Image (cartoon, rainbow, N blue to C red):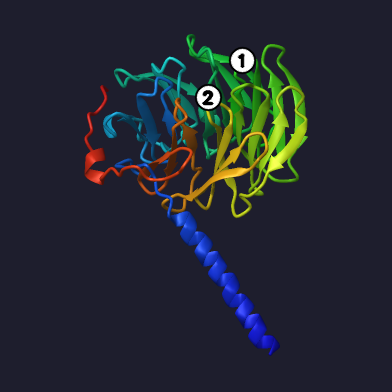
């Protein structure tokens, strides 16, 4: 009798899990953009016109969001490790910064596709030692400074106009996965392999706070639009929250415990926080109470950092992953409105060399 009861309980548990997975699977992307080999990073232009995506082949694609078509490609030098890990537009949408396996941050003119500069975050002599490259690059709100984080640890700040290094700090940090500017550009938050959340005052060139994350690496970081809160993705599958002024720990958002959090992103109005996990699950929390308001699965597993990004109007979520697809999800429903066929996304106009 006991064995029969255990068997029934097991069947009911399995059925519950299956039904939950089926419910999540009903959510489908608004648009699927096909044509980017092994797409990983994605970034919306602040003017809302374009989406940039990158791949392991070192090709950056620029997509026209009004037509959902690829209109331009930028090619990184093919020698060495050319895979891409980070893409970000300048605030005026005129410049695109890319970063990845070759240890450089490259600046591109969006209109012409020409490379403007290659900033060596990891010196050439050290690139064989720090083989994973540059994980994160982000413009300051005024577009004058670029922050980068990489395999060798520490944060570097670059003068965009002069195209040279202006400040480096946190060199003792062990492999920094992510970095982000505060909305006023006065602070930089970073997280990495040593389980520490580090928080710097850029003007004073001093560390504001350090917080440990329960022996789990911090994989992603983002400031809320009002600059009051910092969200950090974690290897334990939860999103940690910190006071952006003091660095004080706030109650975390839980619910992504199935896998590593790979990216976090606040909606433009600051009322929602989206995360995507290694297993491909998108969760969106209401801010500040942490209630889950949306839940969906992306189309496939990722073997690389999977980014997630809100469009400037807050109506779309973009997710890139390593199976040649970029998914655009309607927000907040995470439901499908239309689908783009692979053929419609493969019109390419090569950028100027």
Left or right: 283, with 191 as reference point? left
Q: Position of residue 74 (x, y in %)?
A: 32, 28
Q: Residue at x 51, y 64 (%)?
A: 19
Q: Quadrant of residue 247?
A: top right
Q: Quadrant of residue 136?
A: top right
* Residue 343 seen in render: yes
Q: Nearer the viewer, residue 299 or 104?
A: 299
* Residue 172 seen in render: no
Q: Return the residue found at the far top.
A: 162
Number of numbered discs visible in the structure rendering: 2
Q: Position of residue 174 (x, y in %)?
A: 67, 36
Above or below: residue 227 compared with residue 342: above
Q: Position of residue 56 (x, y in %)?
A: 39, 41
Above or below: residue 242 compared with residue 235: above
Q: Nearer the viewer, residue 345 or 311?
A: 311
Q: Residue at x 26, y 39 (%)?
A: 345
Q: Nearer the viewer, residue 163 or 16?
A: 16
Q: Position of residue 243 (x, y in %)?
A: 73, 28
Q: Return the residue found at the far bottom.
A: 1
Left or right: 19, with 39 as reference point? right
* For the residues bearing labels 1 and 2, Cβ distance under 8 angstroms: no
- Label drawn at residue 138: 2
Mark 2 element type:
strand
Mark 1 element type:
loop
- Nearer to us: label 1 or label 2: 1
- Label drawn at residue 184: 1
Q: Quadrant of the C terminus?
A: top left
Circle 1 residues within 10 Å: few <14, some 14–19, many ≥20:
few
Above or below: residue 321 compared with residue 189: below
Q: Quadrant of the N terminus?
A: bottom right
């Amino acid at each position: 009798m006991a064995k029969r009861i255990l068997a029934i309980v097991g069947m009911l548990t399995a059925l519950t899990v299956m039904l939950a997975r089926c419910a999540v699977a009903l959510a489908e992307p608004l648009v699927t953009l096909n044509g980017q080999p092994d797409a990983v990073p994605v970034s919306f232009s602040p003017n809302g016109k374009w989406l940039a995506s990158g791949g392991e082949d070192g090709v950056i694609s620029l997509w026209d969001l009004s037509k959902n078509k690829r209109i331009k490609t930028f090619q990184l030098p093919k020698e060495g490790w050319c895979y891409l890990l980070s893409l970000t537009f300048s605030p005026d949408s005129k410049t695109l910064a890319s970063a990845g396996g070759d240890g450089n941050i490259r600046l591109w003119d969006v209109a012409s596709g020409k490379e403007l500069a290659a900033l060596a975050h990891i010196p050439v002599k050290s690139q064989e030692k720090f083989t994973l490259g540059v994980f994160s690059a982000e413009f300051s709100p005024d577009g004058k400074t670029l922050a980068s984080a990489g395999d060798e640890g520490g944060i570097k700040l670059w003068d965009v106009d002069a195209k040279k290094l202006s400040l480096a700090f946190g060199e003792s940090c062990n492999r920094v996965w992510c970095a982000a500017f505060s909305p006023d550009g006065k602070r930089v938050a970073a997280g990495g392999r040593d389980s520490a959340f580090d928080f710097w005052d850029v003007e004073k060139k001093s560390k504001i706070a350090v917080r440990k994350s329960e022996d789990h690496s911090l994989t992603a970081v983002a400031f809320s639009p009002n600059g009051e809160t910092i969200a950090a993705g974690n290897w334990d599958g939860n999103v940690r929250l910190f006071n952006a002024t003091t660095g004080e720990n706030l109650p975390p958002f839980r619910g992504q415990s199935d896998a590593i959090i790979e990216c976090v992103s606040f909606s433009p109005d600051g009322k929602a926080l989206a995360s995507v996990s290694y297993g491909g699950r998108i969760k969106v929390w209401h801010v500040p109470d942490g209630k889950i308001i949306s839940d969906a699965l992306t189309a496939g597993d990722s073997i690389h950092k999977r980014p997630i990004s809100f469009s400037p109007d807050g109506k779309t979520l973009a997710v890139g992953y390593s199976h040649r697809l970029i998914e655009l999800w309607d927000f907040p429903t995470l439901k499908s409105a239309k689908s783009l066929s692979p053929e419609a996304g493969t019109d390419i106009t090569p950028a100027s060399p």
